[in-house]
Image (cartoon, helix red, strand yellow):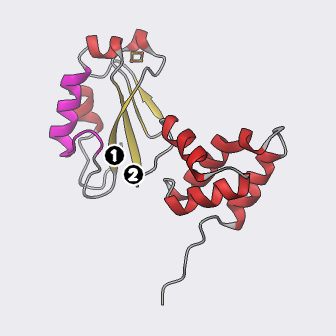
């Protein structure tokens, strides 16, 4: 029989409680609590969302509203690295649509999809604040500026063969 994974671990609860000690009201720790659990699990399941909400004394709907509004909280499973391709105006003018197509051809995934090896998920992102270096994207924690079809080719050349980016 498989062991049940708790909706919140003791380590997650301890980290959330540490955040709670810095805010005047529990809801003030909502985003940090979501980030803590996502750092442990990669995404926020309904079970975890409900448990966090209960721990913070909020309704699940209220917390889900925050989670859904905050782009970097993932409410569905994602790959090991999330590609956040900026599609705001400057990056759009600099050809992000064509670059998205290049990523799709290289990795075999469209927007919102994850590679079959679970390595990458491709998601749209609003302005990353690096418009002077457009077009830009994040891959995991790394910002990539002035991306081109050629730089994408180099970046993802090992994709599917287990190589690092
Ligand atoms: S529009 Fe893409 S970084 Fe600002």
Judge by depth and name the residue closer to the eye, 89 or 61.
61
Residue 131 lies in what quarter of the image?
top left
Q: CA distance from mark 2 to mark 1?
A: 6 Å
Q: Considering only vertical position in the picture, is 123 above or below 8?
A: above
Residue that badge 1 annotates: 121
Q: Residue at x 71, y 62 (%)?
A: 11
Residue that badge 2 annotates: 78
**Callout 2 secondary element:** loop
Classify the position of ligand 1 by quadrant: top left, top right, bottom left or bottom right. Answer: top left
Mark 1: few/some/many CA within 10 Å (<14, 14-19, 20+)? many
Residues shaded magenta: 96-112
Labels 2 and 1 touching (C-beta < 8 A): yes
**Callout 1 secondary element:** strand
Q: How many marks?
A: 2
Mark 2: few/some/many CA within 10 Å (<14, 14-19, 20+)? many
Q: Estimate the x, y position of residue 116 in percent, counting from the top left.
A: 25, 57
């Amino acid at each position: 029989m498989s062991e049940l994974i708790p909706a919140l671990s003791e380590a997650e609860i301890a980290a959330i409680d540490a955040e709670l000690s810095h805010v005047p009201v529990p809801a003030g720790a909502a985003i940090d609590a979501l980030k803590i659990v996502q750092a442990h699990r990669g995404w926020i399941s309904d079970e975890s969302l409900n448990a966090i909400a209960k721990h913070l004394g909020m309704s699940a709907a209220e917390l889900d509203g925050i989670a859904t509004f905050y782009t970097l909280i993932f409410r569905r499973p994602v790959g090991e690295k999330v590609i956040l391709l900026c599609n705001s105006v400057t990056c759009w003018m600099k050809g992000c649509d064509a670059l998205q197509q290049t990523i799709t051809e290289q990795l075999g995934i469209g927007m919102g999809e994850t590679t079959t090896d679970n390595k990458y998920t491709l998601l749209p992102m609003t302005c990353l604040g690096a418009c002077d270096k457009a077009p830009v994207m994040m891959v995991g924690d790394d910002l990539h500026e002035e991306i081109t079809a050629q730089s994408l080719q180099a970046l993802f050349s090992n994709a599917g063969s287990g190589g690092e980016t």
